[in-house]
């Protein structure tokens, strides 16, 4: 069944490529890539759901992954990937690698978690944590050579790293990935992104670099992921998803154009190289019901009308910003996209029940292989 979906999707891509006058292949050749594209990959679609053994929840939770909610299953079923809610098989990972590579994506940025919140390292828990299953599957994939990978340390509540020695242990634990030939680099050094950059001071970053050198790694390119006060002290900066925060005053619905405006406002020229981020969307309403059945904070906004064309335009503007200000970004011309598979938050590129053709995903290839004169 998975292979049938894949065949249908690829056939659709080929058909659209042949019928699209703006596609570079129609002009006789594929143009060189303008940008290097990374996508954030969330590993919450594996493991055992907390409600899997609750009798009244069996219809949806029995075989559900950890982060599927009742609301997501029933009310937002259009977000379900074409292969189903679970992604924890080698076959599905290999399909995802092909889908990403075929559509102009260069690397997955996997979310990685320190399993003992604010505690010492627990290698056994880290190794067996279901959200890391995707990394293991990627490393085993026969086609992993088609797509590179990187690590984003999700340094937030529930998986927070505290203390210099624990950051040293994190580097030691992650060194196996840094040494992989497929690991993404900036300036020739392994790229390590830190969500919630306030949790890591300069002394701790210096110690991490010393640890990397001691492990025969040519130091690290450490990237602050977010707008925390000390983010500007890092070597590089980017965002996971730059969204407005505040009181929605009972009117949570806003247009996707507003989200793009907030996102693109972060693309500023400073002495610190910035990796521009582009958002597919933000609609976390399925997360308003937590996995334990409690209601989340109803403040904040969600965004509608996130059409493929609007997404494409934002990605194109990111490419143009990089070309206009090469000194303000990394020489690899990276762009980060939120996200590959944040279904609960409404930011995803994978083909789904509501979009079996993967319209947003196809836009990436059109941009990365476009010429400068293609700007609309």
Image (spheres, helix red, strand yellow):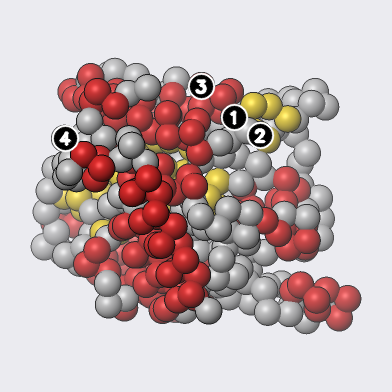
Per the image, the residue denoted by label 3 is 261
Image point (18%, 23%), residue name:
327
Give x and y (percent) for residue 271: 23, 21
Left or right? Give the position of 142 relative to 160. left
Of the image marks 1 and 2, the number of the one nearer the N terminus? 1
Image point (66%, 34%), residue name:
304
Of tags 3 and 1, the one toward the viewer is 1
Per the image, the residue denoted by label 4 is 331
Classify mark 2: residues with Cα within 10 Å, few (<14), some (14-19) or many (20+): some
- Name the outermost residue toward the right: 56
Say which element carries label 2.
strand
Of the image marks 3 and 1, the number of the one nearer the N terminus? 1
Name the residue nearer the viewer: 4 or 269: 4
Of the image marks 4 and 2, the number of the one nearer the N terminus? 2
Per the image, the residue denoted by label 1 is 256
Per the image, the residue denoted by label 2 is 304
Of the image marks 1 and 4, the number of the one nearer the N terminus? 1
Mark 1 and mark 2 in contact? Answer it, CB < 8 Å. Answer: yes
Is residue 73 something that shows in the picture?
Answer: yes
Of the image marks 4 and 3, the number of the one nearer the N terminus? 3
Mark seen at residue 247? none
Distance of mark 3 from mark 2, alpha carbons? 14 Å
Say which element carries label 4.
loop
Distance of mark 4 from mark 2, alpha carbons? 34 Å
Name the residue nearer the viewer: 27 or 275: 27
Give x and y (percent) for residue 191: 25, 49
């Amino acid at each position: 069944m998975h292979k049938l979906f894949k065949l249908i999707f690829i056939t659709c891509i080929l058909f659209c490529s042949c019928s699209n006058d703006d596609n570079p292949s129609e002009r006789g050749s594929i143009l060189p890539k303008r940008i290097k594209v990374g996508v954030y990959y969330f590993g919450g679609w594996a493991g055992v759901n907390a409600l899997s053994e609750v009798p009244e929840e069996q219809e949806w939770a029995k075989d559900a992954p950890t982060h599927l909610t009742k609301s997501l299953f029933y009310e937002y079923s259009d977000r379900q990937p074409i292969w189903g809610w679970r992604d924890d098989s080698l076959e599905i990972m290999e399909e995802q690698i092909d889908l990403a590579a075929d559509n102009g994506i260069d690397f997955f940025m996997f979310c990685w978690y320190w399993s003992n919140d604010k505690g010492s390292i627990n290698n056994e828990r880290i190794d067996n944590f279901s959200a890391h299953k995707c990394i293991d599957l990627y490393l085993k994939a026969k086609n992993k050579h088609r797509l590179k990978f990187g690590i984003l340390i999700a340094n937030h509540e529930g998986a927070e790293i505290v203390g210099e020695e624990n950051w040293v242990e994190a580097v030691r634990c992650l060194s196996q990935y840094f040494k992989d030939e497929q690991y993404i680099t900036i300036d020739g050094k392994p790229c390590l992104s830190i969500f919630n950059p306030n949790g890591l001071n300069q002394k701790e970053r210096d110690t991490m670099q010393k640890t990397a050198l001691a492990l025969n790694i040519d130091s690290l390119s450490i990237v602050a992921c977010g707008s925390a006060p000390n983010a500007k002290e890092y070597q590089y900066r980017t965002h996971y998803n730059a969204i407005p925060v505040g009181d929605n005053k009972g009117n949570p619905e806003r247009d996707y154009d507003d989200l793009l405006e907030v996102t693109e406002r972060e693309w500023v020229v400073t002495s610190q190289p910035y990796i521009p981020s582009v958002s597919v969307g933000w609609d976390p309403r399925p997360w308003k019901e937590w996995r334990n059945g409690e209601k989340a904070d109803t403040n904040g906004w969600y965004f509608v009308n996130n059409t493929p064309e609007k997404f494409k335009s934002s990605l194109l503007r990111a490419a143009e910003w990089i070309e206009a200000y090469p000194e303000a970004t990394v020489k690899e011309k990276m762009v980060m996209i939120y996200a590959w598979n944040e279904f609960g938050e409404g930011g995803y590129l994978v083909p789904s029940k509501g979009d079996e053709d993967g319209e947003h995903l196809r836009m990436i290839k059109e941009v990365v292989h476009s010429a400068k004169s293609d700007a609309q």
